[in-house]
Image (spheres, rainbow, N blue to C red):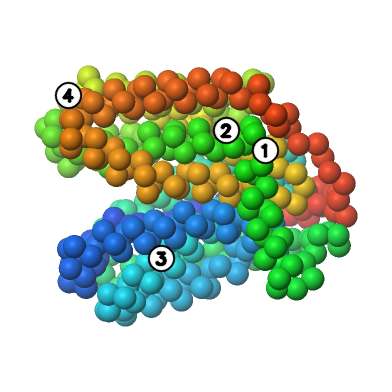
């Protein structure tokens, strides 16, 4: 069964958005190249960007449930464009710090809404397939973004923010063409600002009341602490092992290429398994792949290890989102997906610094052995999920719009 036109509008929009969004690494280069902040202030700016990303998961999911995922995405993009353009002219440290926090939030606030919108426009049995393809677009945009950013940083640094703004507006235009979200059900519709805030707070807290989801989110955080070494400790270990910048780029490019090629195959390969089995497999591949870096001493061995943990990544990304989507009650898809993004993004704040601290204190060998042990514990944790309350899928709840997905599919073919 082909995916509806509405999905492909969303796919194109978020791919363009990721292509134009300025990555934190290039934000650092821009700030230091133009002498806008002192070197000691750079970590604060990057940390504020990360804090914004962490907050965006919970807030973005709750807002998507209140006003609809499509409205959330469309409404956020003009603000993103405006903040990006302000970045191009800001030269005061306080302004740069504030903009970093705000743009970090806006750069990721659409992600739970995107997952929620997919839940609304495709039938449940097609969610894994659709989300896998959605991630392919995400990876294409994120892979090409550094190439574009590096070019613009050399020829016209200010253009980085113009491109960011334009890509955000294109994202809004494409998602605006998706059929409108249905209004909230009458029983759930907020009656004012206080009621809206109370409803949002309930939505944020709800996933953390179910034992199986609390365990899943904790395991997600720990697994992210392992995976995010790819952004910190792993490149440094490769450099210390004698790889050139080009060699490090080649190893990481293997991850990007394999992700794009393999993600569309995942739902077909694991769709018939019990829902926790792909999570077990993903955690095991990541544990072994990152742990194998303890034996790596050259490009070939680092590449082989990367292939292994990439298999875990491509299993994890769509099937973890599916696990959450299957357990989200009607009207709470955004909040439940937001809890996942919060747990994953929180590892940016903890996992990467902790890995670097351990490596600097005891060496990279100790880090990779610790990662292997933690990964084995996470794998065991996923194996125990069926014993917890809430493991079964959420039953379909009655809705004033029971045919929303069918209608969207029919209208956008």
Residue at which label 3 appears: 101
Counting from the top left corner in percent of width and height, residue 361 is at 18, 35
Q: Are dots 2 and 3 in contact, CB under 8 Å?
A: no
Packing grade of label 2 (10 A; few <14, some 14-19, many >=20) is some
Question: Image height check: is 324 above or below 374?
Answer: below
Q: Residue 251 carries which label?
A: none
- The Cα–Cα distance between marks 1 and 4, rounded to whole angstroms, is 44 Å
Task: Tell me how far mark 1 sits from mark 2, CA to CA.
Answer: 9 Å
Q: Residue at x 64, y 34 (%)?
A: 211
Measured as percent of width and height from the top left, residue 96 is found at 32, 72
Q: Does residue 310 show up?
A: yes
Do callouts 1 and 2 mark residues in contact (Cβ within 8 Å)? Answer: no
Q: Quadrant of residue 260?
A: top left
Residue closest to the eye, 266 or 79 = 79
Sequence-first disc among 4 and 3: 3
78 with respect to 287 (left or right): right
Q: Is residue 125 depicted above or below 80 in this figure?
A: above
Residue located beneath label 2 in the image: 215
- Using the numbered discs, state the Cα–Cα distance from disc 4 to disc 3 in whole angstroms: 38 Å
Q: Distance between the residues labelled 2 and 4?
A: 36 Å
Instruction: State the separation of the CA atoms marked 2 and 3.
Output: 29 Å
Disc 3 secondary structure class: helix
Which residue is tagged 4?
A: 297
Q: Which comes sooner in the sequence, label 1 or label 4?
A: 1
Circle 4 SS class: loop
Which of the 4 image quarters holds residue 367?
Answer: top left
The image shows residue 7, relative to residue 78, as above or below, that is above
* Rendering quarter of residue 74: bottom right
* Quarter containing the N terminus: top right
């Amino acid at each position: 069964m082909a995916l509806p036109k509405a999905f492909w509008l969303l796919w194109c929009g978020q791919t363009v958005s990721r292509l134009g969004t300025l990555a934190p690494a290039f934000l650092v280069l821009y700030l230091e190249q133009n002498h806008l902040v002192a070197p000691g202030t750079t970590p604060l700016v990057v940390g504020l960007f990360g804090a914004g990303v962490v907050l965006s998961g919970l807030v973005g999911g709750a807002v998507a449930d209140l006003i609809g995922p499509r409205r959330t995405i469309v409404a956020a993009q003009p603000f993103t464009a405006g903040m990006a353009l302000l970045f191009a002219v800001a030269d005061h440290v306080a302004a740069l710090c504030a903009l970093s926090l705000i743009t970090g939030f806006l750069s990721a606030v659409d992600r739970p809404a995107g997952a929620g919108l997919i839940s609304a426009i495709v039938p449940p049995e097609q969610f894994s397939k659709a989300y896998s393809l959605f991630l392919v677009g995400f990876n294409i945009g994120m892979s090409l973004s550094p190439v574009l950013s590096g070019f613009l940083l050399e020829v016209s640094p200010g253009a980085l923010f113009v491109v960011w703004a334009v890509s955000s507006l294109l994202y809004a235009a494409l998602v605006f063409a998706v059929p409108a979200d249905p209004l909230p059900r009458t029983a759930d519709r907020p009656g004012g600002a206080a009621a809206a805030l109370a409803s949002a707070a309930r939505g944020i807290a709800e996933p953390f009341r179910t034992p199986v989801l609390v365990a899943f989110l904790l395991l997600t955080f720990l697994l992210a602490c392992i995976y995010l070494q790819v952004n910190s400790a792993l490149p440094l270990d490769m450099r210390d092992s004698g790889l050139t910048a080009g060699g490090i780029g080649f190893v990481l490019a293997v991850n990007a290429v394999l992700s794009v090629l393999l993600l569309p195959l995942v739902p077909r390969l694991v769709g018939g398994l019990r829902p926790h089995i792909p999570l077990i497999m993903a955690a095991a591949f990541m544990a072994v792949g990152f742990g194998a870096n303890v034996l790596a001493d050259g490009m070939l061995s680092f590449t082989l290890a990367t292939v292994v943990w990439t298999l875990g990544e491509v299993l994890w990304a769509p099937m973890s989102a599916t696990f959450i989507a299957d357990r989200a009650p009607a009207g709470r898809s955004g909040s439940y997906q937001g809890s996942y993004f919060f747990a994953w993004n929180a590892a940016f704040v903890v996992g990467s610094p902790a890995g670097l601290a351990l490596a600097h204190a005891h060496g990279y060998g100790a880090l990779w052995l610790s990662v292997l042990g933690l990964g084995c514990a996470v794998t065991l944790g996923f194996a125990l999920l069926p014993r917890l309350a809430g493991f079964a899928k959420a039953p379909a709840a009655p809705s004033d719009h029971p045919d929303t997905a069918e209608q969207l599919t029919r209208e956008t073919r």
